[in-house]
């Protein structure tokens, strides 16, 4: 077992190490049986968590929407540091020792109520291979426009919930079509987001460099990695665009990435069986932006 687990509950609000080889979640836990909970996944490098404040803010926002309590930033940080101090060696992709850090808040059992846990695991070689080699992707209809959910808080718009069955089914369908990843679109073909990532693309023209992403306020989970990339790009003089984006915009871009906290910027080398340009120099630049403190 290479994962390290820390539990935060009423008895241990500051977190306590748990044995990951024994059962920790009860069979009637609503996070398990109903997907009733929220989570965040962070990346740690050489024992230091990246973008902690942004992740805790998004975790808190998700928890508020789901009417769940959220551990304080101090307790979460302390529990993460405890887990990292006892973790197996991190994965080596050339950027330091890397770990994936997952923070979960579950509704818990009806008797005991909500609780949280943190899992720290080495980043696997498959992630490093995707960074190096890129991925293929297909566009899949989302079925409805999530922007329409904004006025209905009970639909949890913008919350990062444990209900990821649709996302996983989309990935399985993409792989049945010979692709690695799925990118959701509306019925009108507006690009939304990857099944587990944000979409970013670059246009480089004479005297004009632009990064683009779909509108983050239109039913799309706000990406902490996308936000960090855009903040760094702005400082470097790039123009920024927030959609709307359509398949033709991706096909005509100079580079397209699926970005997330652990995978960083993964180049898309083929979309719907059409080759896309892959620019290693641009990928290194975007990755350097993610790496900035």
Image (tube, rainbow, N blue to C red):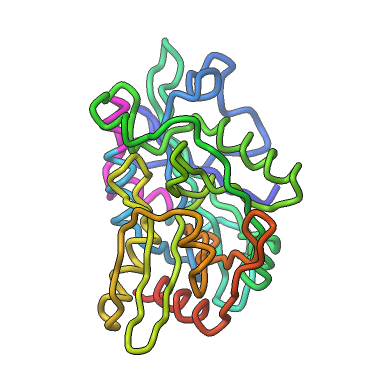
Q: In which quarter of the image is residue 89?
A: bottom right
Q: Does the magenta stretch include residue 178?
A: no
Farthest-out residue, bottom: 207
Percent position (x, y) of residue 247?
Answer: 50, 55
Between residues 189 and 30, which one lies in front from this camera angle?
Answer: 189
Residue 16 visible here: no
- Residue drawn 30% across the image and 35% down it: 70
Instruction: Tell me the quadrant of the picture where the C terminus can be found.
Output: bottom left
Examine the structure image and report whether residue 68 is included in the region drawn in magenta. Answer: yes
Residue at left 59%, top 47%? 182
Q: Quadrant of residue 131?
A: bottom right
| Residue 194 versus residue 60 in the image, above or below | below
Main SS category, magenta section: helix
Residue located at (48% from left, 70% from top):
253
Which residue is drawn at the image coordinates 33% and 61% (left, top)?
227
**Where does residue 264 sit, x and y in percent of width and height?**
50, 65
Residue 213 % position (x, y) = 38, 59
**Figure check: 58 above or below 144:** below
40 lies above or below 187:
below
180 to 145, vertically: above or below: below
Quadrant of res 232: bottom left
Residue 25 shown left or right of residue 103 in the figure: right
Depth check: 123 or 237 in front? 237
Q: Can residue 191 be seen by looking at this rendering?
A: yes
Q: Residue 231 or 190: which is nearer the viewer?
A: 190
Q: Which residues are the magenta region?
A: 62-80
């Amino acid at each position: 077992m290479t994962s390290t687990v820390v539990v935060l509950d009423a008895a241990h609000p500051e977190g306590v190490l748990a044995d990951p080889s024994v059962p920790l979640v009860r069979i009637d836990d609503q996070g398990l049986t109903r997907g009733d909970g929220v989570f965040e996944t962070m990346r740690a490098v050489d024992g230091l968590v990246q973008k902690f404040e942004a992740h805790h803010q998004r975790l808190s926002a998700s928890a508020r929407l789901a009417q769940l309590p959220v551990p304080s930033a101090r307790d979460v940080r302390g529990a993460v540091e405890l887990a990292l101090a006892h973790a197996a060696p991190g994965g080596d992709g050339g950027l330091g020792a890397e770990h994936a850090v997952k923070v979960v808040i579950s509704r818990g059992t009806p008797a005991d109520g909500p609780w949280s846990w943190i899992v720290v695991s080495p980043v696997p070689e498959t992630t490093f291979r995707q960074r190096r080699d890129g991925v293929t992707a297909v566009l899949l209809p989302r079925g409805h426009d999530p922007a329409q959910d904004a006025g209905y808080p009970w639909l949890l718009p913008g919350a990062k919930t444990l209900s990821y069955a649709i996302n996983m089914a989309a990935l399985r369908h993409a792989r049945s079509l010979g692709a690695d990843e799925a990118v959701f679109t509306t019925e009108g073909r507006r690009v939304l987001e990857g099944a587990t990532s944000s979409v970013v693309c670059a246009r480089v023209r004479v005297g004009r460099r632009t990064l683009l992403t779909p509108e983050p306020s239109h039913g799309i989970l706000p990406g902490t990695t996308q936000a960090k990339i855009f903040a760094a790009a702005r400082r470097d003089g790039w123009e920024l665009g927030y959609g709307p984006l359509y398949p033709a915009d991706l096909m005509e871009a100079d580079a397209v990435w699926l970005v997330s906290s652990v995978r960083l910027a993964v180049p898309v080398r083929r979309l719907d069986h059409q080759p896309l340009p892959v620019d290693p120099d641009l990928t290194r630049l975007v990755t350097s932006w993610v790496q900035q403190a």
